[in-house]
Image: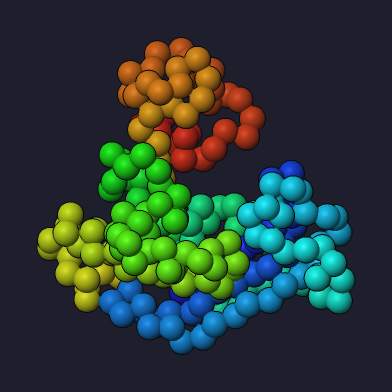
Amino acid sequence: MSILILDTESTGLNEPQVNELGYVKVDSLETLEVLDTFEQRYKPDKPSELGALMTHNILDSELVDCSSYLTASLPIETTYVIGHNIDYDMGVLNLTNADIKRICTKALASYFLPELDSHRQSALLYYFEGDEARAKLLQAHSALPDVMNCRLLLGHLLDLICDKFPKIPRADLTIEQLYAISEEARIPVVMPFGKHRGEYIKDIPLGYKSWLLKQPDVDPYLVKALKG
């Protein structure tokens, strides 16, 4: 079984293509010891949007001699991937339909720390690491440094989870259990959009729920909430 913590940089939000991929393979949730690292840049078929360029500072001219973005891939033995807003990264890699289980640290943080005003990775590192976070964030928005920061964040979240579930010590927490917790955390409690935005989903009229369930491309986790 292979567990990867990964991050991508991309051309932006409009049909994004990967221009940098980084990941680490870890041995277990107990130690998160790094067994292997990977970082590589790729050449997209289109330029980066200004918003993306501002974030990752990867110039299109630096990618001219890189392999095509279509060659970006994960090891074939990968079973679980972990990342902050992991669905975006898997979408950038065109692996949303792959038989790989996704664990989202953003969903876990939002679920267990709903009172925080931000659940971005950098903000969470400041929450857990205090002033020491600044040095760790100097290279943020480059794939491999972001992966290492995600690994650090994951360690804090695992401690938090084990505090919430004292019957599961950190040494005994399995990747299967973490995946189940992540899946539960990804089911929204509050309606994220529309005329009932901000309302508890359990309080939304049944007629609206029924109508929304008939719409195309509804997020599968929202579907679970609406049917819950």
In which image quadrant can residue 160 be found?
bottom left
Q: Residue at x 64, y 69 (%)?
A: 21
Q: The C terminus appears in which quarter of the rendering?
A: top left
Counting labels gives 0
State whether residue 95 appears in this view: no
Where residue 30 sits in the image (x, y, percent)? 28, 77
In which image quadrant can residue 92 be found?
bottom right
Q: Residue at x 74, y 44 (%)?
A: 14
Q: The N terminus appears in which quarter of the rendering?
A: bottom left
Q: Residue at x 81, y 75 (%)?
A: 66
The reply, left or right, for residue 122 in relation to residue 71 is left
Above or below — where is 148 with respect to 197?
Answer: below
- Which residue is at the front of the view, 79 or 30? 30
Where residue 200 sits in the image (x, y, percent)? 34, 24
- Which residue is at the front of the view, 142 or 30? 142
Where residue 106 sits in the image (x, y, percent)? 42, 51
The reply, left or right, for residue 195 in relation to residue 132 is right
Above or below — where is 158 with respect to 164?
Answer: below
Q: Residue at x 76, y 70 (%)?
A: 42
Where residue 199 sits in the image (x, y, percent)? 37, 21
Query: Looking at the image, what colour scheme do you see?
Result: rainbow
The reply, left or right, for residue 226 in relation to residue 218 is left
In which image quadrant can residue 93 be found?
bottom right
Above or below — where is 48 with respect to 167?
Answer: above
- Which residue is at the front of the view, 224 or 53? 53
Furthest-left residue in this view: 167
State whether residue 39 appears in this view: yes
